[in-house]
Structures are given as structure tokens and as C-alpha cells.
Image: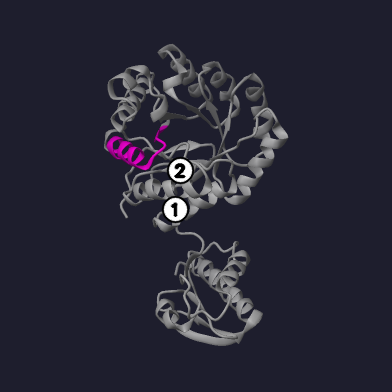
Amino acid sequence: MQRYQTKQIHVGSVAIGGDAPISVQSMTFTKTANIAATKAQIDRLTLAGCDIVRVAVSDEADAKALQQLRAQITIPLVADIHFRYKLALAAAPFVDCIRINPGNIGSKDKIKAVVEACKEHQIPIRIGVNAGSLEAQFEKKYGPTPEGMVQSALYNVKLLEDFGFTTLKVSLKASDVPRTIAAYRALRPLVPYPFHLGVTEAGTLFDSSIKSSMALGLLLMEGIGDTMRVSITGSLEEEVQVAKSILKFSGRQQEGIYYVSCPTCGRIEADLIGSLEKIKQNLTHIKAPLHVSVMGCAVNALGEAKSADIAIAFGKGSGLIIKKGEVLCRLRGEELIARFVQEVELADKEYFENLAAGK
């Protein structure tokens, strides 16, 4: 799939834009000044595979905590600033990126001061435009519409460019799918900078997963997007897991298992749901982009197995393991799942050995 080529920037060690992989971001919900609690959340996100983490900087105590916090974590740190531009100045020496919402930062002089601090410390800025907090002139003329979001972004991009600053990325977030898609689509041909994708205030795990899959998945399939966050109320690992699934199913990330499993019906003679969960729990470490089929009977299994790297078909008391369309064996009970996990691990090993050998 074609992808829009954008200017590449770096947030710490993570490249964003150009030909860099699309990165996954998340955000803590602790009080940042509580360093131990914030670090614990960042550690959980890092373990889940998060590439970049953002923390809220709401007051001087949060800003002062950044130096110590950054020294204790292993992924890039972004300071999220609203209203008080001086907090951005205090944060700049100790983070890898500053995120500002120009609609609530204030005057040009305040934004220029933030720019100068980011220049000094050689860190990028994310221009975070939200439909719910546009500058007064755009809110009055356009309302909280995609056009208003785009005009705000263009104004602020030009403002930073006029200050001699081009190490930036842009986000255009609304709380619903249509406005989010429309805004990103409209702005994409107009600026060369990388886009951070997201649906803001997306809601619970269920609602956010659907909203984000629709909006972000579609944009990614159209070649739009360089980094992303799935915003889920009160969640951490789930944000990363959903984001990585969207990347995988949109075809933008080739890592880990792509599962195909049957929707269940009256022909099933085994505990397919429980078996699938057991299989997934035992294969979370797999990194190779393998297609794995888990079927509850033989009716669809052989057809699905033709396009799967490894397949398993459960039957009454026993089941088949199929590799590249060929039946390897028929086994019973726990032995069947154990052998299946072993075959997937072997396929993972073979994939990376072939990659190293240039095959």
C-alpha cells in the first residue's frame, strides 16, 4: 500500500515519518509528580510494546518531576501542556517532545517562547488541534468542524515555520469518526509533516476500539498516519494492544500472529473458545508475521489451512495440525494444543533464520 511520504523527525530514539514504522503512543493517568506511580504505569506500557509515552504537566510539581522520571524509563517522554506555556519552558530540558494545543496556549509571543525552548533543546513539537478547543477566530467562523480544525492547523504550522521551526508533527482530533477522518484527509496534501492519529475522548474499551478501528484503520489504509494513539478511558495495556491490532489488520504492521478463527456453530464438538484463549496466552511472545488458523471442525479447516502458515482443527476428542496445507498429525486433548504451540514457535524461529540468511 502506498503511504504519504512525510518529513522525518525524531522523538528521542524513535523516528516518525518518512519510511519509519508507524509508532504506537499512550499516556499515563497518574499525577506526574507522583514519580513512583507514573513510572509504574510507564513500565506497564513499555512491557506492552508502547513506543512513546506522554504525561500531563499540569503544574510546577509535575514539571519538576520530569528530570527524575526520564532517567528511570527507557522509552521517549512527551510533555502534554495546556494553557500554561511556562510549564513547557520548564519541561523542555527533560523531555523528548512538547505537545501543545495552540487553541489554549495563548498569544504568539507565548508560542514563540515554547518554540525557542524546543530549538535550544533540539526536541520536536506536536501541534495538537482538538475540535473542542479551537482558537476563537476559527471557532467563530467555522465551528468545531473539519474545516475549522484544518484552518487552525495550517495557521499554527505557518506560525512555527515563521519562527524558523519545522521539527513538528500534527494531530487533528475529534471525538467522532466522520470529523476525524475528514480533517486528516483534508490536511494531508497541504503540509509535509508527519501526522499523529487519534480519536479524542473516545470512551470505554468497547466504544473506543470501534471508533478507533473505523477512523484510524481507514486512514492508515489510505496511507495517512505516522504515529498513533488509541484513547481508552482508564486503560493502559489495552490502548497499546488495540493500536497494534489496528496496525496489523490494516496491513501497516507485519509483526506477530494474525489469527483466523471460526465464528462457532452447532458443528463444534470441542471447547473452541477456551482452547483459543489458551493458545493465544501461550503465543504472546511470537514476533514473526504468521497466519494462524484455529477452527472448531474440519468443514472449513482444510480450506482455511491452505492460506495459513499453521492451522489447528478441533474435533470430537481429537484434532488435526496442518502446516502449509499439509496435515502433520492427529492428536488428542492437551497434547494437541502443546504440539500446535510447538509448531508455531518453530515457524517463528524459521522465519527469523530465513530473514537473517536473506531468504
**Residue 72 visible in rendering:** no
| Other-residue count near label 1 (Cα within 10 Å), few / some / many at <14 / 14–19 / ≥20 | many
Q: Do tag 1 and tag 2 residues touch (Cβ < 8 Å)? A: yes
Residue 246 got which mark?
1
Picture coordinates of residue 120 (x, y %)? 51, 21
Q: Quadrant of the N terminus?
A: bottom left
Q: Judge the density around disc 2: few (<14), some (14-19), many (≥20) Cα neighbours within 10 Å.
A: many
Q: Quadrant of residue 167?
A: top left
Does dot 2 land on a helix, a strand or a loop?
strand
> Residue 119: x percent and y percent?
48, 23
- The x, y position of residue 226, in whole percent, is 41, 43
Mark 2 residue type: Met
User: Magenta includes 173?
Assistant: yes
Q: Which residues are magenta?
A: 169-188
- Amino acid under disc 1: Ile
Task: Find numbered disc 1 in the image and state the secondary structure of the residue it sits on.
Answer: helix
Residue 163 seen in render: yes
- How many numbered marks have been drawn onto this rendered protein structure? 2
In-front residue for pair 154/59:
59
Q: Residue furthest front?
A: 266
Q: Is residue 212 above or below residue 323?
A: above
Tell me the residue at 48%/37% (across/down): 201
| Sequence-wise first label, 1 or 2 | 2
Residue closer to the observer: 317 or 151:
317
Q: Which residue is mark 2?
A: 228
- Which mark identifies residue 101? none
